[in-house]
Amino acid sequence: MVSWRRDHQLPGVLVCQKHGTPLLTLPYDRDSVQREIFLWPNNDWNKKQAQSIADWSDATLNDLQRLAQIAADIAGGKLAGGYSMKIMKNVCLLALHDQGLTAADGSLNLSNALSDYRNHYVNVDGVPDFTTVMQRSIRPLLYVLRRKERPTHHLEWMLIIDWLFGDWATFQEEYERANGE
């Protein structure tokens, strides 16, 4: 029996976070969207010719599994005290410093940061769901460091959090620590 799982429906989730197996995907069907047809797990998979992308390397599957877990954790958690650009800036600067991505004066070493970000995501660079997000790279981080409000897609922040902190729990812990100071 096929069933829907909430964590499998989140943007950026292409593999099961528990098993690392590629999820079935449905091709975008404009007619169904315009008719507001609800997709039922059992019958519609066959009708809509669901597909699974099975040609990803093990390294890509591992990265996608890690990202799927972060997506689920973000959806299930929240930041104590809410979002603050000041706290976000401080937490990100500390993480950048810890990874050796800042200059002696504490400013961001942009070329090293961009290179590190690209290297971190080399395995998912060609995955269609992340292609556009990857093109924006660390731009949302630059906005926060400059304290400028800009609309940012949640997948962009998910990638930045993964890159700088490795998981949601570490980010959340650092954020809450900075919030308490």
Image (cartoon, rainbow, N blue to C red):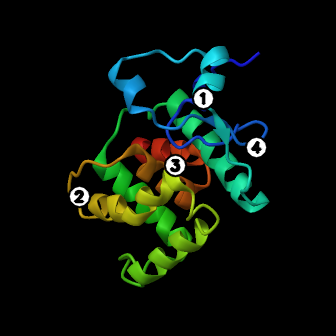
Q: Would you call the spot at circle 1 few (<14 residues within 10 Å), some (14-19), or many (20 or more)?
A: some
The numbered disc on residue 7 is 1
The numbered disc on residue 154 is none
User: How many angstroms separate mark 2 from mark 1 (CA)?
Assistant: 32 Å
User: How many angstroms separate mark 3 from mark 1 (CA)?
Assistant: 24 Å
Q: Would you call the spot at circle 4 few (<14 residues within 10 Å), some (14-19), or many (20 or more)?
A: some
Please indicate, yes or no, whether residue 124 appears anywhere in the rendered image: yes
The spot of residue 156 in percent (x, y) is: 42, 53
Task: Examine the rendered structure and indicate whether residue 108 appears above or below residue 171.
Answer: below
The secondary structure type at the circle numbered 4 is loop
* Residue visible at 47% across and 57% down in the picture: 160
The numbered disc on residue 20 is 4
The spot of residue 74 in percent (x, y) is: 52, 36
Amino acid at circle 1 = Asp
Q: Earlier in the sequence, mark 3 or mark 1?
A: 1
* Residue visible at 31% across and 43% down in the picture: 84
The secondary structure type at the circle numbered 2 is loop
Task: Examine the rendered structure and indicate whether residue 175 appears above or below residue 160.
Answer: above
Q: Earlier in the sequence, mark 4 or mark 1?
A: 1
Disc 2: which residue? 147
Quarter of the rendering containing residue 1: top right
User: How many angstroms separate mark 4 from mark 1 (CA)?
Assistant: 13 Å
Please indicate, yes or no, whether residue 109 appears anywhere in the rendered image: no
The secondary structure type at the circle numbered 1 is helix
Amino acid at circle 2 = Arg
Disc 3: which residue? 174
